Image (cartoon, rainbow, N blue to C red):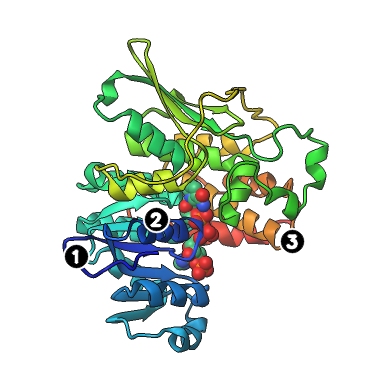
């Protein structure tokens, strides 16, 4: 592996959530590419050990650990003294809006990522966004920021596919977006079989290796619901024109249908390194050695509709964004709590949609006026969702 150097002509990148699935893959790419990026800042929540290894290798000027209880462990494990070393969640926004960074990769998970996306865009920084929850909860606020259109680049594979298909096109000529879904591990389960799904079953995704939260979201199809909201805000496309479809092979990452009857799809083996690289190198393409498809071999690409009765979370997301205001944030908070509680073995798998439904039924539509209102709605909804099924 080549050691990235400190050349100031390199693209300077801050990675929020560097110890997670997206964060570590991004650092692998950066290390493999050698002299393209300079890692300016890294943040982790609790995994101080991995953060220290990453920091000791890349020597970023700024290091953040948001869970303060591991402060002394991190301090002991660092082999150098970064110029800035912060503990606690508030420092994330400072790094996200730092003028020294050319790009912020937001690879945080959940609502915790919203404020960083907001502050980064507000400061004029460019954001490569993996944290889809930012757009889910605060799409309305983010799209109002003057730099939104130029400075937000998607990392999510489906949205990267859409983005790539739209290069050179106008949004006015888009008739429909087909967003593909692998269907997850329970695509062929009966409703009866779903009653006994364990944590281990749900963490076993057929095509992708990801963090735990998104793996559970993929299995419940909430992930596709979140991604429909993400596409809606990202491209300003009517929610009813974004159609989810199951494509079990995860080769076609999404399709744009244009008004002249033509469609464009973006394809490749399921590998998050491809959309991560595209987002961090955009508008360039950088040569990179990942597995290619072999079209000489027999390959089947199949499509099927999603069973919205068996997977109600998809519809919760669509309905929440149609109602608008704070409801997507309420839905997102209830989902985060339900997924966390399922992973902690406090509730059954089939209780996840019940918790989301009950939480959504309790909160009423309210317009979003500020990020603070989102934070309060998130806190209140979490409290409510945590009190259910005790
Ligand atoms: P992981 O759970 O693997 O990583 C999350 C990262 O965020 C870790 O660095 C973690 O730190 C940090 N983190 C967790 N909680 C907090 C918090 N409360 N405050 C600050 N930092 C926190 O997630 P993924 O990498 O899988 O996903 C990241 C985002 O990317 C999600 O929004 C996901 O939906 C999206 N995404 C992921 C894909 C994937 O393939 N993984 C594909 C497409 C989108 P630590 O580990 O140190 O505790
Ligand atoms: Mg995706």
Q: Is residue 289 above or below residue 8?
A: above
Q: Is residue 29 above or below residue 99?
A: above
Density class for disc 3 (Cα within 10 Å; few <14, some 14-19, many ≥20) is some
Of the image marks 1 and 2, the number of the one nearer the N terminus: 2
Q: Position of residue 20 (x, y in %)?
A: 50, 61
Q: Residue at x 45, y 44 (%)?
A: 290
Of the image marks 2 and 3, the number of the one nearer the N terminus: 2
Q: Is residue 181 above or below residue 222?
A: above
User: Closer to the camera, 192 or 140?
Assistant: 192
Q: Which residue is mark 2?
A: 29
- Give the numbered dot on residue 346: 3
Density class for disc 2 (Cα within 10 Å; few <14, some 14-19, many ≥20) is some
Circle 1: element type:
loop
Circle 3: element type:
loop
Q: Nearer the viewer, mark 1 or mark 3?
A: 1
| Left or right of residue 195: residue 52 | left
Q: Position of residue 156 (x, y in %)?
A: 44, 44
Q: Residue at x 71, y 38 (%)?
A: 186
State how far apart marks 1 and 3 are (Cα). Answer: 44 Å
Q: Are marks 1 and 3 in contact (CB under 8 Å)?
A: no
Q: Is residue 388 above or below residue 70?
A: above
Q: Which residue is mark 1?
A: 99
Of the image marks 1 and 3, the number of the one nearer the N terminus: 1
């Amino acid at each position: 592996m080549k050691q990235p150097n400190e050349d100031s002509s390199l693209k300077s990148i801050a990675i929020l959530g560097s110890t997670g699935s997206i964060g570590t893959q991004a650092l692998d790419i950066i290390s493999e590419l050698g002299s393209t990026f300079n890692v300016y800042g890294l943040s982790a929540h609790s995994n101080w050990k991995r953060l220290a290894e990453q920091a000791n290798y890349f020597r970023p000027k700024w290091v953040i650990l948001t869970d303060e209880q591991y402060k002394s462990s991190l301090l002991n494990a660092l082999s150098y003294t970064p110029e800035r070393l912060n503990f606690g969640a508030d420092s994330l926004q400072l790094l996200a809006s730092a003028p020294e960074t050319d790009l912020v990769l937001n690879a945080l998970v959940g609502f915790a990522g919203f404020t960083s996306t907001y502050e980064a865009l507000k400061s004029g920084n460019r954001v490569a966004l993996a944290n889809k929850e930012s757009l889910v909860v605060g799409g309305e606020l983010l799209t109002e920021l003057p730099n939104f259109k130029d400075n937000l680049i998607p990392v999510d594979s489906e949205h990267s596919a859409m983005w790539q298909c739209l290069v050179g096109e106008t949004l006015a000529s888009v008739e429909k977006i087909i967003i593909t879904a692998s269907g997850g591990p329970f695509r062929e389960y009966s409703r009866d079989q779903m009653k006994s799904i364990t944590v281990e079953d749900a963490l076993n995704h057929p095509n992708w290796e990801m963090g735990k939260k998104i793996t559970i979201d993929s299995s419940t199809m909430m992930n596709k619901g979140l991604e429909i909201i993400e596409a809606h805000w990202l491209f300003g496309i009517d929610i009813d024109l974004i159609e989810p479809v199951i494509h079990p092979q995860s080769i076609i990452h999404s399709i744009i249908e244009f008004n002249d009857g033509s469609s464009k799809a973006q394809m490749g083996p399921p590998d998050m390194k491809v959309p991560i690289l595209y987002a961090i190198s955009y508008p360039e393409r950088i040569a990179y050695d990942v597995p290619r498809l072999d079209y000489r071999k027999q390959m089947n690409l199949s499509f099927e509709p999603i069973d919205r009765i068996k997977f109600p979370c998809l519809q919760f997301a669509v309905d929440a964004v149609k109602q608008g205001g704070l409801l997507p944030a309420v839905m997102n908070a209830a989902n985060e709590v339900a997924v966390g509680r399922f992973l902690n073995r406090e509730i059954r798998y089939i209780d996840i949609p019940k918790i989301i439904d009950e939480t959504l039924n309790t909160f009423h539509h309210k317009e979003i006026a500020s990020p603070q209102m989102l934070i309060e709605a998130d806190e209140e909804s979490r409290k409510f969702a945590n009190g259910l099924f005790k």
